[in-house]
Amino acid sequence: MPFWAGARDEAFALDMLQVMGDRDAVIWRNHGLVVVADSIELAVDKTIGVEFNAQVLFIALQVGQPQGLRYGGDSRILTSDLGD
């Protein structure tokens, strides 16, 4: 997700939610992970899930080019920008 300078207010938060769409988490390059959830416990669980999947992807990249899994017709593994 691109990061841009500007005010960090309610409008910024609403813009981020719009960018995220139906996703529960986004990783900001050079900033970190943002997770949305109904409770702290669920947010922690989702954070652990993202970390686990990042580790699996890292290992998969060591042995070749991972193939994206299809979920509702949308590939959820984006490998074109992983080398930066």
Image: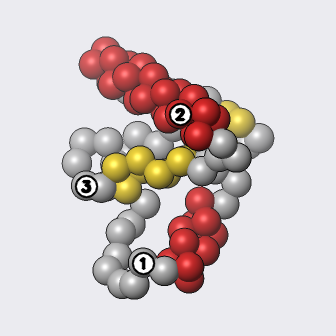
- Residue to which mark 3 is pinned: 30
Which residue corresponds to mark 2?
A: 44
* Extreme residue toward the front, this view: 40
Residue 51 makes an appearance in the image: yes
Q: Position of residue 62 (x, y in %)?
A: 27, 19
Chain-order first, disc 2 or disc 3: 3
How many circles with numbers are drawn on the protein? Answer: 3
Residue at image position (22%, 48%) is 84
Q: Amino acid at mark 2?
A: Val
Left or right, 83 with reference to 6? left
Residue 79 point in image, percent of width and height: 41, 40
Q: Nearer the viewer, mark 2 or mark 3?
A: 2
Residue tagged 1? 8
Q: Earlier in the sequence, mark 1 or mark 2?
A: 1
How far apart marks 1 and 3 lie (CA) works out to: 17 Å
Q: Residue at x 77, y 41 (%)?
A: 72
Q: Residues within 10 Å of mark 3 (few under 14, many from 20)?
A: few
In which quarter of the view is residue 65 placed?
top left
- In the picture as drawn, the residue positioned furthest to the right comes out as 72
* Distance between the alpha carbons at the discs numbered 2 and 3: 21 Å
User: Is residue 64 found left or right of 1 in the rendered image?
Assistant: left
C-beta proximity under 8 Å, tags 1 and 2 = no
Q: Residue at x 25, y 55 (%)?
A: 30
Type of amino acid under label 1: Arg
Q: Which element is circle 2 on?
A: helix
Amino acid at circle 3: Asn
Q: Is 22 located above or below residue 10 in the figure?
A: above
| Camera-side mark, 1 or 3 | 1
Quadrant of the frame with the N terminus? bottom left
